[in-house]
Image (cartoon, grey):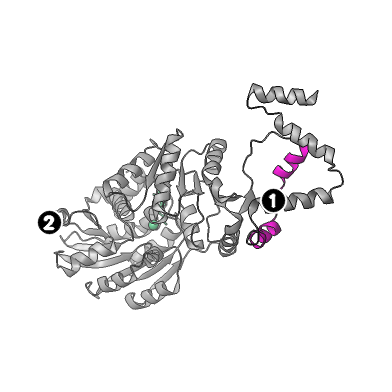
């Protein structure tokens, strides 16, 4: 068989031929570090706590050994719990592809889909169930799932489930699952409540942790730009025009803002779609599809809607608004730089938000460089010196202190007065010259004429 001579790195796990075929078809040649460590332990029947940053291939790390262990006895043998419907769909797609030659049947269970439809699908006797916590618990409580006997249970993206408030539901779900099982817990980070959960539901687990020097992926170049609150739209369009990103995700804080920004971008001729939790399931799928198929190359999204989404070739992530915490920052920028590709993450920061950015910087322990927006001013030396002057981190520390005492226009004028007084080179004449030079970009002939008359 062709793949046997291809030197595929997955051969070392001695998997069934049909799974190797699925792996080859997905184009995987070498197991990622988390896969290399996790797959043998899972195949040997151990419970597992596996920690690795986003985009490192955790899905295949559990899906491959699970598929290899299925007995195909018309029961639900494997259960995967994941925080969002998008992730559930994504995981079941990956399992479908890996298990194609085994003809594995997978059911995807999530809120928003008709219960009747899900029960019909259950009648097809799937071996694998991928579910979000809320809907799964609902089915279990109402005794709707027949042939439910999972021998292997995965908690995927556990830290996300914690953030989304699912821990309670998860503990309840486990009351419905027989003790005689193998349990796997996957997470990008390991906060205390997740460790506590692991103690309750895992049995003598092995741990795998893929160490990274910094929490964030080294393939992602990270930049930030200082802007004013009212400049976000302008900054985003200027950056998009200058950088011309191939495919980008822009994160906003709220659903309404995502809608508004996406509409604004569309009105300016950019190919943008929107993704947030208030959209109908079908609208969400349409948006994801057109982004995946490059019909739109900008996706404006909120955090929750985009958790764990794996869309290949995202070249840029923009934070239109700062994320709420360092974890969210890491998850957002993890949408780019996936599977060994390079990516860039750009954050817009107002001076008042600078303190939050510093916190993120400290937590992720990684280079985050300050850049300035490409400007389009046409000015004299003095003005361009000011406009091009690099913003120092001291000034950003001072800004919130001063701006809480005085309004911005006054502050700028006071600082300019201070500057003029301390620079002897700036005489009254020089200032007059600067004013004239500003008039020299006439908006109309009328203005040009006035200027000429004044010069004479
Ligand atoms: P995580 O769950 O760790 O965030 P995913 O499982 O979503 O990451 O995988 C990220 C991307 O890497 C996916 O597009 C996946 O198909 C790809 N991938 C996973 N394992 C491999 C591999 N061994 N070789 C090449 N690509 C891989
Ligand atoms: Mg994942």
- For disc 2, does the CB lie below 8 Å from ligand 2? no
- Identify the residue at image location x=31%, y=69%: 183
Q: Residue at 71% of width from left, 25% of height from top? A: 450
Indicate the quadrant where residue 379 lies: top right
Does the magenta portion include 14? Answer: no
Residue at x 35% of width, y 62% of height = 156
Identify the residue position indicated by label 2 in the image: 123
The local secondary structure at tag 2 comes to loop
Where in the figure is residue 425, as x and y percent of width and height? 86, 43
Task: Specify whether 450 is left or right of 22.
Answer: right
The verdict on residue 382 being magenta is yes
Determine which residue is flagged by label 1: 412
Q: Please name whichever residue, 102 or 312, is drawn nearer the observer in this view of the structure.
A: 312
Task: Answer left or right for 251 relative to 364.
Answer: left
**397 or 446: which is nearer to us?**
446
The residue under the point 63% across, 27% down is 443
Q: Main secondary structure of the magenta part?
A: helix
Q: What stretch is highlighted in magenta?
A: 380-402
Q: Residues within 10 Å of mark 2 (few under 14, many from 20)?
A: few
- Circle 1 Cα neighbour tier, 10 Å, few/some/many (<14 / 14–19 / ≥20): few
Residue 120 place in picture, x, y as percent: 13, 54
């Amino acid at each position: 068989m062709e793949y046997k001579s291809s030197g595929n790195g997955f051969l070392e796990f001695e998997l069934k031929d049909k799974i190797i075929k699925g792996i080859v078809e997905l184009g995987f040649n070498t197991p990622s570090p988390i896969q290399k460590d996790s797959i043998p332990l899972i195949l040997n029947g151990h419970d597992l706590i596996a920690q690795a940053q986003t985009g490192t291939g955790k899905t295949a790390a559990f899906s491959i050994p699970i598929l290899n262990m299925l007995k195909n006895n018309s029961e639900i043998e494997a259960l995967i719990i994941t925080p969002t419907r998008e992730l559930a769909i994504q995981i079941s797609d990956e399992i479908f592809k890996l298990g194609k030659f085994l003809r594995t049947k997978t059911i995807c269970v999530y809120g928003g889909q008709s219960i009747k439809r899900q029960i019909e699908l259950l009648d097809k006797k799937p071996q694998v169930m991928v579910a979000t916590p809320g809907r799964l618990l609902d089915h279990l409580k109402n005794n709707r799932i027949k042939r439910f006997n999972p021998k292997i249970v995965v908690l995927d993206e556990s830290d996300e489930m914690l953030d989304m408030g699912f821990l309670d539901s998860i503990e309840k779900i486990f009351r419905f699952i027989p003790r005689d099982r193998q349990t796997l817990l996957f997470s990008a980070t390991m906060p205390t409540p997740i460790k506590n959960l692991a103690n309750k539901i895992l049995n003598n687990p092995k741990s795998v942790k893929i160490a990274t020097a910094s929490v964030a992926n080294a393939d992602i170049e990270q930049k930030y730009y200082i802007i004013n609150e009212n400049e976000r739209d302008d900054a985003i369009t200027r950056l998009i025009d200058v950088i011309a990103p191939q495919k980008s995700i822009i994160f906003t804080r709220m659903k309404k803002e995502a809608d508004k920004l996406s509409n604004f971008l569309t009105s300016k001729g950019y190919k943008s779609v929107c993704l947030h939790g208030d959209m109908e399931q079908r609208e969400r799928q349409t948006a994801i599809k057109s982004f995946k198929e490059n019909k739109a190359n900008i996706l404006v999204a909120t955090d929750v809607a985009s958790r764990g989404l794996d869309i290949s070739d995202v070249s840029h992530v923009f934070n239109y608004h700062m994320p709420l915490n360092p974890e969210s920052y890491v998850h957002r920028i993890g949408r780019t730089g996936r599977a060994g590709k390079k990516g860039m993450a750009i954050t817009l920061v107002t001076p008042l938000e600078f303190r939050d950015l510093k916190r993120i910087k400290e937590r992720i322990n990684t280079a985050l460089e300050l850049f300035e927006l490409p400007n389009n001013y046409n000015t004299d030396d003095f003005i361009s010196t000011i406009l091009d002057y690099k913003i120092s981190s001291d000034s950003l520390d001072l800004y919130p202190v001063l701006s809480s005492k005085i309004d911005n226009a006054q502050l700028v004028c006071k600082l300019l007065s201070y500057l003029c007084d301390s620079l002897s080179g700036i005489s009254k004449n020089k200032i007059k010259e600067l004013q004239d030079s500003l008039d020299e970009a006439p908006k109309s002939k009328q203005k040009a004429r006035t200027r000429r008359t004044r010069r004479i």
